Image (cartoon, grey):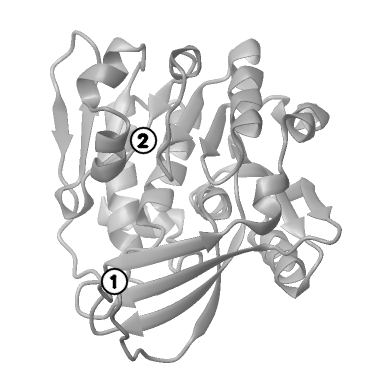
Amino acid sequence: MRPRIVVVGSSNTDLVVAVPQIPAPGQTVLGGTLQTIPGGKGANQAVAAARLGGDVRFIARLGDDAYGAAARANFAAEGLDTHFVLTTPGVASGVALIAVESTTGENSIVVAPGANAKLRAADIAAASPAFDKAAVIVISLEIPDDAVFAAVEAGHARGIPVLLNPAPARHLPGDILRKLAVLTPNQSELAQLGGSEALLAQGVAALVTTLGAQGARLEQLNAPTEHFPAPVVTALDTVAAGDCFTGALAVELARGQSLPAAIRFACAAAALKVTRIGAQPGLPYRDEVLDVL
């Protein structure tokens, strides 16, 4: 059985250029060939979860442009349920401008939200049937707060575990943090959110921090910290590695795996992702991750 997962978030088209180094402020760097690649945190997480074994329903907004049409066709090809992916008249689809350092795979990203900024709490309410029989809800922060909060409340009211990826990081009220099953920041996002102690004190049930090549760390109140190493790989492109981790974690939790087992699976999935170019094109499939494990 493919567990049902609801993903609420953004869809972007990534305009990617490989560069010898990430430019400093005021610096111009000549790069390689422009690539147009499907991306966006929500869409990346949805595609990752689908490739890794989830039955995924995606809630998002697209613009009524060529990028939006291409994104919708890609979702269909990946097997996502897009009944609640809405087209927004007169608005451009989201776009991300990405520079990827060719020697390390590290990246610098600027996002033009477009239609993502139009997703609202009313859209979440209208998508109520999407939550039927869901095992996990995944949310990220490239959409407005009212949509984020409505999705958290929808999961909490139904007793569905909510996994929130706080990217890009911004303040989240304590009454929202207390309703999450898992929060998955990276190290810089964790710092922006006030650190582990503050988040746990506010009621975060499980804090899973991604550490790049060092894997991930699990922290829970009144429990010892656990560290999970990542497989050693040569990174080519770290874009969407965190999204891959989040999607993988959601799938394993939806399948009834323990949180530590789900983190190990997610570390392996993210390690595979960074060995491949492109956000969604580089996301691994379930059998590939199982081979690594």
State the CA–CA distance, disc 2 to disc 1: 29 Å
Residue lying at 30% horizontally and 77% vertically, measured from the top left: 26
Residue 134 in view: no
Q: Is residue 48 above or below residue 5?
A: below
Residue lying at 46% horizontally and 63% vertically, measured from the top left: 110
Task: Answer whether labels 2 and 1 touch (C-beta < 8 Å).
Answer: no
Could you say which is closer to the camera, residue 202 or residue 4? 202
Residue 95 x, y percent position in the rendering: 59, 66
Q: Residues within 10 Å of mark 2 (few under 14, many from 20)?
A: many
> In the rendered structure, which amino acid carries the disc numbered 1?
Pro
Could you say which is closer to the camera, residue 255 or residue 225? 225
In this rendering, position of residue 73 left or right of residue 38: right
Report which residue position mark 1 lands on: 25
- Quadrant of the frame with the N terminus: top right
Q: Is residue 109 above or below residue 118?
A: below
Residue lying at 86% horizontally and 58% vertically, measured from the top left: 89
Q: Secondary structure at mark 2?
A: loop
Could you say which is closer to the camera, residue 231 or residue 182? 182
The residue most toward the right is: 89
Name the mark on residue 257: none
In this rendering, position of residue 36 left or right of residue 205: right
Residue 292 x, y percent position in the rendering: 27, 56
In this rendering, position of residue 3 left or right of residue 126: left
Residue 288 x, y percent position in the rendering: 37, 60
Residue 153 x, y percent position in the rendering: 62, 18
Report which residue position mark 2 lands on: 184
In this rendering, position of residue 86 left or right of residue 97: right
> In the rendered structure, which amino acid carries the disc numbered 2?
Thr
